[in-house]
């Protein structure tokens, strides 16, 4: 799909509704450069899929709770999303955002060998929020997130990809860029600043 | 978050679910739309339909299409002793309470191909409770119920089942309970001699027995909150006073209309106990 197929990203964008983030190999380092930059009282929910092993409890939420000014939780089924909160997908479940603003989990088949799947989260958020969704694809060694980011753009949302040259694993950002050539290509510091900026505009 | 206005796809989806409910009496309208939409999109693509309306036409007029569509609509993913910590908590914390009853009934709601029920039957046998227990396994999927009756699983799933069983505090060897033949593991028929598998819908059917334990795991995640409330209401009305309800690892009663009727018995394993006074 070329950039021309996407609806234009308007200058005065509608209020963002949620940020969705996907990361795989190198996720902890990358997220450590992004999530702790979100200020307390950040006005958006942030939903994160990290590829983690299915058979043990994930340390992600505990790890980032200590580093972050915003609240950090592992998502529970049918939990209403709250602003200023980071939700991690639990191991072995897909995480989806519903139009009613509630999180849904699913044990459906892995997608691209992944459960949780970045594509599943992004596609659901694109469907739920349309132009109000901001999708961010970070480092990773597979192609998960590419189809999801395309869905985000097709719905009029904002696509952000970590600059592959700065990613610990470049395959995932590269695949996302191939699927979504007009995405903003940013370094981790720039992504942190961009997400903070969404909060400013929201006030 | 402002919801989007209804699109053409949305209208067609709504009508498709209405058509299925009208013609086949399976009502998916209270399912969690985020994941149901995904499965319906897969079904639409599988049948080569350009739109949900075309899929609706196919499903209403081609009687062979519905069973195939049905397999997309229901999620059948389970394993023996899935989440071993749950079974360990049942064994160590719930079984001592269950021992105090002269006879027991256990309801596995949404039993899929029977993995959970066989797990409980093995656990109850290990704990010496099997002979006083009747197990009900219910599901809306007739194919899954047939598989559950048969108790035959692919042999390549057995290493995971065995590991789960050990982690759950298993007191025997899982290999005591099945015979391997032709790439399949056939579970011991005596495990289901006290089991009844039957068609029952949490969407539309009523309470059918008084039970001491309900195990319903990774079923409620496919329902929206209203339907979850209906299902949990059935569990509440089925359970004896101080009876137990086990949910999936990421399911909770936190957002349920019935939260107040239960106490968190083993919070981390999502085991709840019905309060004494009703």
Image (cartoon, helix red, strand yellow):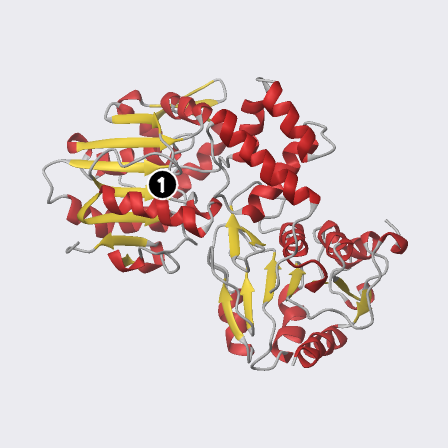
Q: Is residue B224 above or below residue B151?
A: below
Crowding near the residue tagged with mark 1, few <14, some 14–19, many ≥20 C-alpha atoms within 10 Å: many
Foreground: B92 or B27? B27
Relative height, residue B149 to residue B128 (above, below): above
Percent across and percent down for residue B232 are 33, 47
Residue B35 in view (yes/no): yes
Establish if B239 lies above or below A173.
above
- Image quadrant where residue B48 sits: top right
In the rendered image, the quadrant that contains the C terminus of chain A is bottom right
**Residue behind mark 1:** B165
Residue at image location 45% in from the left, 36% down from the top: B159
Give the structural element (helix, strand or loop) at label 1.
Answer: helix
Left or right, A190 with reference to A87: right
Measuring 66% from the left and 52% from the top, which residue is drawn there? A127
Residue B30, image x, y percentages: 47, 43
In the rendered image, residue A63, in percent from the top left (x then y), is placed at 52, 71
């Amino acid at each position: 799909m070329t950039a021309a197929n996407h609806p234009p990203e308007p200058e005065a964008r509608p209020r963002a509704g949620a940020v969705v983030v996907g990361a795989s190999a190198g996720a902890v380092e990358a997220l450590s450069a992004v999530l702790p930059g979100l200020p307390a009282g950040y006005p958006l929910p942030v939903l994160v899929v990290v590829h983690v092993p299915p058979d043990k409890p994930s340390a992600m939420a505990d790890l980032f709770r200590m580093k972050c000014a915003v609240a950090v939780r592992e998502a529970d089924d049918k939990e209403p999303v709250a602003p200023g909160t980071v939700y991690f997908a639990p191991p072995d479940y897909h995480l989806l955002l519903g139009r009613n603003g509630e999180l849904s989990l699913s044990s459906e088949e892995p997608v691209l060998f992944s459960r949780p799947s970045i594509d599943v989260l992004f596609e659901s958020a694109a469907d739920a929020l349309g132009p109000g969704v901001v999708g961010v694809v970070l480092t990773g060694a597979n192609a998960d997130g590419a189809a999801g980011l395309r869905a985000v753009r097709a719905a009029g949302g904002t696509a952000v990809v970590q600059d592959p040259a700065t990613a610990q694993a470049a395959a995932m950002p590269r695949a996302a860029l191939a699927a979504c050539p007009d995405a903003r290509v940013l370094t981790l510091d720039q992504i942190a600043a961009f997400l903070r900026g969404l909060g400013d505009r929201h006030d | 978050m402002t919801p989007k206005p209804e699109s053409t796809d949305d209208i067609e989806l709504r009508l498709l679910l209405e058509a299925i409910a009208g013609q086949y009496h399976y009502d998916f309208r209270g399912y969690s739309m985020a994941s149901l939409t995904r499965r319906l999109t897969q079904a639409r693509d599988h049948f080569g339909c350009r739109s949900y309306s075309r899929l609706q036409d196919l499903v209403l007029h081609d009687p062979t299409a519905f069973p195939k569509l049905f397999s997309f609509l229901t999620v059948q993913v389970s394993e023996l002793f899935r989440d071993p910590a749950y079974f360990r908590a049942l064994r160590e914390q719930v079984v001592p309470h269950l021992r105090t009853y002269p006879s027991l009934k256990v309801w596995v709601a949404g039993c899929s191909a029977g993995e959970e029920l066989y797990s409980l039957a093995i656990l109850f046998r290990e704990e010496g409770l099997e002979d006083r227990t009747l197990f009900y396994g219910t599901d809306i999927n007739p194919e899954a119920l047939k598989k559950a009756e048969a108790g035959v699983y692919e042999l390549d799933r057995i290493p995971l089942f065995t590991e789960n069983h050990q982690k759950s505090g298993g007191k025997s060897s899982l290999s005591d309970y099945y015979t391997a033949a032709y790439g399949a593991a056939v579970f011991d028929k005596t495990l289901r001699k006290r089991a009844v598998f039957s068609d029952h819908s949490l969407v539309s059917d009523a309470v059918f027995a008084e039970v001491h334990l309900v195990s319903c795991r990774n079923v409620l995640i496919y329902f929206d909150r209203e339907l979850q409330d209906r299902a949990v209401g059935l569990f509440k009305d089925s359970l004896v006073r101080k009876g137990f309800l086990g949910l999936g690892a990421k399911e909770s009663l936190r957002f349920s209309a019935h939260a107040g009727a239960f106490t968190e018995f083993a919070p981390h394993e999502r085991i709840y106990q019905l309060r004494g006074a009703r």
